Image: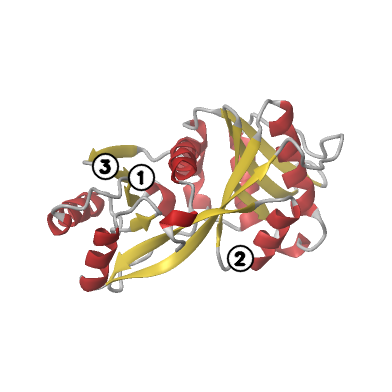
Amino acid sequence: MQDNKAVNLPLVRRLEAVSFRAWPASSVIYDGSWQIRLTGSHPSKRINCVVPLDPSDYGNSAVRLEKARKRFEDFGRPLVVRETTLMPPQLKDFLVKDGWSVFEEVKVMTADLSGMELPETLVSLPSHDIGRFVEASLKVSDGDASLRPAIAEIVSSIKPTLGLFINEEVEGSPLATVICVQDNDLAGIISLDVDKSQRQKGLGTQILASALRWARISGAKSAWLQVVSTNAAAIALYEKFGFTEAYRYRYWHKGAEDKGAEE
């Protein structure tokens, strides 16, 4: 994790807020400034985690984490804590002493859309057909078909302006998919996937360019995304578009608990 002094904390707070709206949990409650995000229908860590949001709020950590664990248990989820630069260092120290460990690190990257070189035409036009998009996304990512209703519910509950992009050779044969969520002047890139058999052919570049151009036309000034820090291929793609790291966050779990689904 970066030194907090090197991080723009107001930007972190804003990006955290828009990311919550871009991939909403079905249940959100607060314990002080800790946000408790839970979704019984889908195992994604982003919507099943505890997110401390105030560097000064760390009192009674053991009691509060046990209370959260019971709530997660009711949802059939393992307790996961998401550490951003807003998490109190005292809470991090407690997690270490209590036997918790980090199991994944994610980069949050941003880019200026105003000066970005993008094609004049959109290779892919945004769709508003959620069912069609979810079906395409599951095919491209080789995802669990049983999660189709849950993904459709999550996408349907996204409140900001939404662009669903599908790159396909022929109708019903998707090659790449991505979600772009425009929240005022910020555009979020969510769940970019390219079919494994079609990678290294420029499809990720094409569909990302289309999503970003659509966002810029729609009034977005900056773009953001989240990517696992070990995903070198995806990071290289994003850097080609001018994305740079804003901050990182990490997921913690205790012992050998199931870590939950990937991002």
Residue under label 3, please give it.
Answer: 33
Question: Which labelled disc corresponds to residue 58?
Answer: none
Residue 226, image x and y in percent? 55, 52
| Residue 259 percent location from the top left of the image | 38, 64
Residue at the location (64% across, 37% down)? 222
Verify CB contact (< 8 Å) between mark 3 and mark 2: no
Residue type at numbered disc 2: Asn
Side of 149 where 244 appears, left or right: right
The picture places residue 86, in percent across and down from the top left corner, at 36, 50
**Label 3 is placed on what type of residue?**
Ser
Residue visible at 43% across and 41% down in the picture? 13
Foreground mark, 2 or 1, reads 2
> Mark 2 Cα within 10 Å, few/some/many (few <14, many 20+)?
few
- Distance between the Cα atoms at labels 3 and 1? 19 Å
Spatial CA distance of label 2 from label 1 is 26 Å
Q: Residue at x 72, y 31 (%)?
A: 216
**17 is higher (above) or lower (below) than 254:** above
Picture residue at 76% right of the left edge, 33% below the top = 125
Q: To which residue does mark 2 refer?
A: 231
